[in-house]
């Protein structure tokens, strides 16, 4: 087989493969675009955790700011909103060391879901104390709506 024959054979194989690769890439792009806002926020939360784990606190903060903006624009699950705010509090504590900022983020998370808890793998005694402080400052839940029965 000559070089020309080999090149021709490779070209015949490469054309269909390049079309298949293009279809796969387009499908992956459409799949990413088809994510719901909640899925996008979950992905961003995962990215923020990864950045925090890598001590990239500024990157974690930027990702969380974007995720919080997206979550406020859509009806995102309250537990997910709480987790975003809790991680923002943890990141803020590492960046700024200001207990008021950290407790404020914890309070925002608790306002979204008052039963949510800090991730035990990302806490320490100082953060636990600030979380307890935020929990104590949470207003009492509204009383349940009475159910009227018609007798």
Image (cartoon, grey):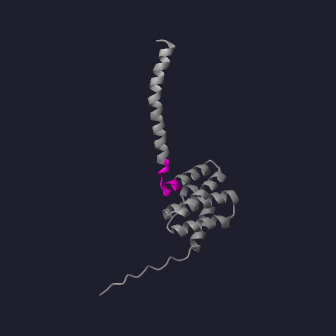
Q: Position of residue 16 (x, y in %)?
A: 44, 30
Observer-nearest residue: 116 or 142?
Answer: 142
Q: Position of residue 47 (x, y in %)?
A: 57, 50
User: Where's the C terminus, which quadrant?
Assistant: bottom left
Q: Residue at x 52, y 52 (%)?
A: 43
Which region shows up in magenta?
A: 32-42
Q: Residue at x 50, y 57 (%)?
A: 37
Secondary structure that dominates the magenta span: helix
Magenta residue check for 148: no
Q: How many marks?
A: 0
- Give the answer, above or below, for where 40 lies relative to 74: above
Quarter holding residue 131: bottom right
Observer-nearest residue: 12 or 139?
Answer: 12
Give the farthest residue toward the bottom.
151
The reply to whether residue 129 is in sight is no
Observer-nearest residue: 26 or 65?
Answer: 26
Q: Residue at x 47, y 46 (%)?
A: 30
Quarter holding residue 64: bottom right
Q: Please state if 144 lies on the left or on the right of 137 as rendered.
A: left
Give the farthest residue toward the left.
151
The reply to whether residue 142 is in sight is yes
Q: Position of residue 70 (x, y in %)?
A: 55, 59
Quarter holding residue 73: bottom right
Q: Position of residue 116 (x, y in %)?
A: 51, 64
Observer-nearest residue: 131 or 64?
Answer: 64
Q: Please state if 148 lies on the left or on the right of 116 as rendered.
A: left
Magenta residue check for 39: yes
- Give the answer, above or below, for where 148 lies relative to 26: below
């Amino acid at each position: 087989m000559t070089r020309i024959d080999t090149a021709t054979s490779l070209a015949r194989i490469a054309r269909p493969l390049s079309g298949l690769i293009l279809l796969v890439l387009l499908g992956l792009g459409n799949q990413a675009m088809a994510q719901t806002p909640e899925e996008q926020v979950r992905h961003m939360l995962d990215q923020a955790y990864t950045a925090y784990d890598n001590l990239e606190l500024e990157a974690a903060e930027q990702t969380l700011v974007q995720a919080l903006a997206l979550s406020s624009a859509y009806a995102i699950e309250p537990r997910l909103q709480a987790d975003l705010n809790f991680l923002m509090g943890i990141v803020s504590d590492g960046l700024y060391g200001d207990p008021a900022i950290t407790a404020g983020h914890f309070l925002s998370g608790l306002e979204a879901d008052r039963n949510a808890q800090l991730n035990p793998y990302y806490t320490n005694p100082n953060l636990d104390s600030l979380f307890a402080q935020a929990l104590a400052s949470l207003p009492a839940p509204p009383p349940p709506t009475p159910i009227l029965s018609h007798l």
